[in-house]
Amino acid sequence: MRKQTLSMQTLINNNKKEILFNEKELARIEKRIDEKHVKQLENSR
């Protein structure tokens, strides 16, 4: 029983790490999109 609880905790921790990583990736991608839009706006003036 203890081993099963431990592995569940490990899975939860891994998921938390993955979510944090995904949030960082999303922020990075959003920043790149914003930069692209800013350039397009500057070019269209």
Image (cartoon, helix red, strand yellow):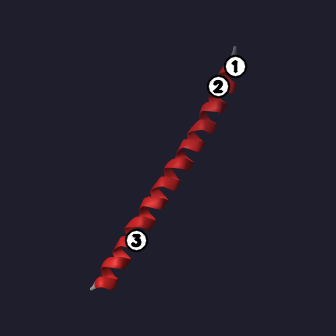
Q: Residue at x 68, y 25 (%)?
A: 40
User: In the rendered image, which residue does mark 3 sit on?
Assistant: 11
* Residue 29 image point, x, y percent: 59, 43
How far apart are the alpha carbons under marks 1 and 3?
46 Å
Front residue of this view, candidates 33 and 1? 1
Residue 8's place in the image compared with 30, above or below, is: below
Q: Nearer the viewer, residue 20 or 42?
A: 20
Q: Amino acid at mark 2?
A: Val
Badge number at residue 24: none
Lower position in the chain sequence, tag 1 or tag 3? 3
Q: Which residue is at 32% across, 82% downward?
A: 4
* Left/right of residue 8 with respect to residue 21 in the rendered view: left
The reply to whether dot 1 and dot 2 touch (C-beta < 8 Å) is yes
27 relative position to 36: left or right: left
Q: Please give left or right for residue 6 compared with residue 27 in the image.
A: left
Task: Give the image quarter of residue 31.
Answer: top right
- Please identify the quadrant where the N terminus is shown: bottom left
> Which residue occupies 54% across, 48% down?
24
The secondary element bearing badge 1 is classed as helix
Residue 20 appears at what percent x and percent y?
A: 48, 54
- Name the mark nearer the viewer: 3 or 2: 3
Query: Which numbered disc covers residue 42?
Result: 1
In this view, the mark in front (1 or 3): 3
The front one of 13 and 25 is 13
User: Which residue corresponds to mark 2?
Assistant: 38
Could you give the CA–CA distance between mark 1 and mark 2, rounded to whole angstroms?
6 Å
Give the CA distance from mark 3 to mark 2.
40 Å
